[in-house]
Image (spheres, helix red, strand yellow):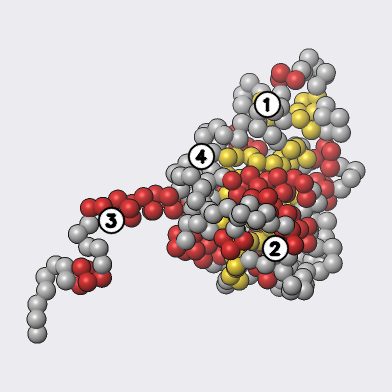
């Protein structure tokens, strides 16, 4: 369905979305960069200021509504998806942004998380993934790598972590992207595309917790290793990475991924896999979400973006259809329908 969110007649600026509240995240926290990126993206989208809504659950990331000068709800632990669903269905003309963390959305909120994806409700989800419970002082989370020592795993966690992208696609997700708190330009580009997607969009942001899980993503983000460990995909372009874009992803005859280098062993640019984010078949997209150093680079950008019917559009259409054929047009009609009697 065509986007019905009202556009602003007066161009908005970053300052229009800056809250007067003191930002209480730790100095150096990746959340600061994410906040600034959202403040830049909202004016670019061009909607009326009163049509933005920011909704969160519990966690460091969930302080977000206080730090945006928009309507918002600071919800309860794990329930941001349920609240966001209700808000969007009650008022389809709102641009709804759900802010959540790896603990908030994948532990207590796991059930709500997979079902907002499955239903494909037009909500934009920003998932801050720092692989730790930061607000409660350093317990391991559903995305903490196996073996990591934390406050609640002094000998190393023995749990198998969730891969957010794998979980999203497994829940029939149609839009998944991954970005980094250290790459604001990429964040803003991905967020804007997520907003323009009609349906549930999930943006995983690898975010650093400087206090309780510092350098969790260092292998991917450090200057010394990032060129070989970051693959930024673009639709219709070969999947190249490396300092000089000399490396790429190739599919073997038995449908396995391998890293190859252009110019070696007869490899040319034509041997490199071309990214197709619009392919309804999620096989390649799923494989891309699972790539990780040191064998492969981690994949960033919009990995999957497929058009599909949304729950909210179908609900609006269903209500409109029923209004056309129903004999009940008011509460009085309802109360006087069916079997009635006098006492």
Asked if residue 168 is positioned above or below residue 342 in the image, the reply reads above
Q: Which element carries disc 2, helix, strand or loop?
A: helix
Q: Is residue 154 visible?
A: no
Which residue, given by chain and number where applicable, does mark 3 sit on? 323
Whether the residues at callouts 3 and 1 have beta carbons within 8 Å, the answer is: no
> Dot 3: few (<14), some (14–19), or many (≥20) neighbours within 10 Å?
few
Compute the Cα span from label 2 to label 1: 40 Å
Compute the Cα span from label 3 to label 1: 50 Å
Image position, residue 128 (x, y; %): 69, 58
Mark toward the start of the polypeptide (4 vs 3): 4
Whether the residues at callouts 4 and 3 have beta carbons within 8 Å, the answer is: no
Q: Quadrant of residue 262?
A: top right
Q: Residue furthest left?
A: 342
Whether the residues at callouts 2 and 1 have beta carbons within 8 Å, the answer is: no
Image position, residue 53 (x, y; %): 58, 63
Compute the Cα span from label 2 to label 4: 30 Å
Compute the Cα span from label 1 to label 4: 22 Å
Which residue, given by chain and number where applicable, does mark 1 sit on? 273
Mark toward the start of the polypeptide (2 vs 4): 2
């Amino acid at each position: 369905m065509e986007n019905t969110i009202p556009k602003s007649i007066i161009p908005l600026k970053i300052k229009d979305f800056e809250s007067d509240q003191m930002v209480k995240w730790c100095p150096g926290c990746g959340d600061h960069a994410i906040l600034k990126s959202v403040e830049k993206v909202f004016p670019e989208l061009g909607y009326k200021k009163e049509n933005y809504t920011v909704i969160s659950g519990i966690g460091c990331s969930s302080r977000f509504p206080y730090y945006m000068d928009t309507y918002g709800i600071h919800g309860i632990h794990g329930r941001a998806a349920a609240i966001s669903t209700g808000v969007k269905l009650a008022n389809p003309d709102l641009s709804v942004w759900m802010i959540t963390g790896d603990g908030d959305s994948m532990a207590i909120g796991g059930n709500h998380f997979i079902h907002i994806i499955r239903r494909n409700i037009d909500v934009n989800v920003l998932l801050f993934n720092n692989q730790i419970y930061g607000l409660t002082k350093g317990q391991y989370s559903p995305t903490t790598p196996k073996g990591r020592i934390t406050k609640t795993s002094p000998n190393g966690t023995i749990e198998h972590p969730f891969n957010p992208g794998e979980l999203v696609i497994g829940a029939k997700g149609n839009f998944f992207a991954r970005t980094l708190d250290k790459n604001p330009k990429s964040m803003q580009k991905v967020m804007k595309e997520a907003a323009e997607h009609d349906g549930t969009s999930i943006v995983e942001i690898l975010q650093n917790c400087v206090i309780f899980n510092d350098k969790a993503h260092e292998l991917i983000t450090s200057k010394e290793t990032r060129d070989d460990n970051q693959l930024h995909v673009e639709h219709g372009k070969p999947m190249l990475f490396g300092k000089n874009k000399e490396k790429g992803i190739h599919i073997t005859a038995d449908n396995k991924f391998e890293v190859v280098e252009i110019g070696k062993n007869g490899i040319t640019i034509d041997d490199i896999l071309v990214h197709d984010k619009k392919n309804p078949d999620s096989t390649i997209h799923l494989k891309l979400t699972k790539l990780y150093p040191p064998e492969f680079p981690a994949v960033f950008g919009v990995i999957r973006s497929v058009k599909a019917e949304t729950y909210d559009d179908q609900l609006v259409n269903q209500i409109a259809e029923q209004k056309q054929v129903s004999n009940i047009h008011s509460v009085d009609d309802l109360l006087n329908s069916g079997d009635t009697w006098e006492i």
